[in-house]
Amino acid sequence: MADQGMRYTYDGTFEGYLCAVLQALRSGKVPAAITDRRNETRPDLAVNVATSLKDAEYLYSTISARSSAEVQQMVSDYFLTDCASLEINLYKMIFCSLKYGAKIAEDYSSELMSGIQMAIRDLYREAQSILQELDFYLGEEASCAVINPRNSVLPIIRKPVLKRRDIDDLLVYDKRHHLLLERYSEQNMLLDISDFPMPEFKDPKEAYDFLWPFVRDRRFDVRVIPGQKKSGSVIEPLWLKAS
């Protein structure tokens, strides 16, 4: 890789992160840092990268084309982990996938790739554990559960949760990552609600009493993102951004 380059910030979404990576790649220099702009301590020294779905989809599809669908999936999975230096490690993985192709996924001698694979295995182990232990409070209009996982597991478990037919309308709130999974009137959404100040809920009933009116009354404005993968080229959003 080339000499160290700029600091980059993004909006916290997977699409935003890919845009920051693409800008860093085009600069020809290894970024000094890539950071969620909400966590950036020196915003005056960082390049604030705007999110472009076109640019994100271009890089995401290029990863698959130059390496494999497996590597592409590893990129989105690793983004959900709670690893130190996640953004810069993922940048290095993307760089290597574009340069060396699919073989990086089987490079067991690489400390970087071994760490990434271990983190992804831990992500799926925690997701399975959370799924098995999910405990819903049965409210008058919906059921609600609150989780506090180390990794961001809601994007992993959302499909099996939403397939449950013993519960009608439901909420699952991840209080650590500020994500809200909702099923209401047969509409399913996974929302990033980090822009909304949330109290510290003591139990799922408190979460239900506070969150359900927002869901029921459609108070969350949601940025429109393409919803499904098509031929491996369009990003399936990990979550939608509410504002």
Image (spheres, rainbow, N blue to C red):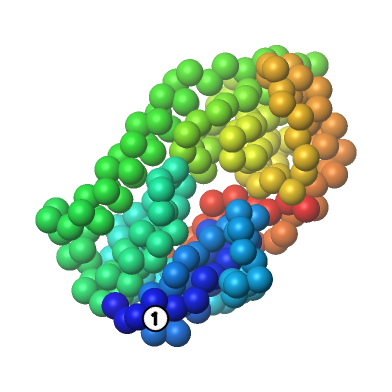
Q: Which residue is drawn at 39% across and 66% down?
A: 91
Image x and y of residue 168, in percent: 68, 25
Above/below status of 152 relative to 44 = above
Image x and y of residue 233, in percent: 45, 69
Q: Residue at x 59, y 71 (%)?
A: 46
The count of marks equals 1
Residue 38 visible at all: yes
Image x and y of residue 158, in percent: 53, 38
- Left or right: residue 66 versus residue 21 is left
Q: Residue furthest bottom?
A: 27
Crowdedness near tag 1: few (<14), some (14–19) or many (≥20) residues, C-alpha within 10 Å: some
Residue 168 visible at all: no
Q: Mark 1 — residue?
A: 29
Image x and y of residue 70, in percent: 29, 58
The amino acid marked with disc number 1 is Lys
Quadrant of the image occupied by residue 123 = top left
Q: Residue at x 17, y 57 (%)?
A: 110
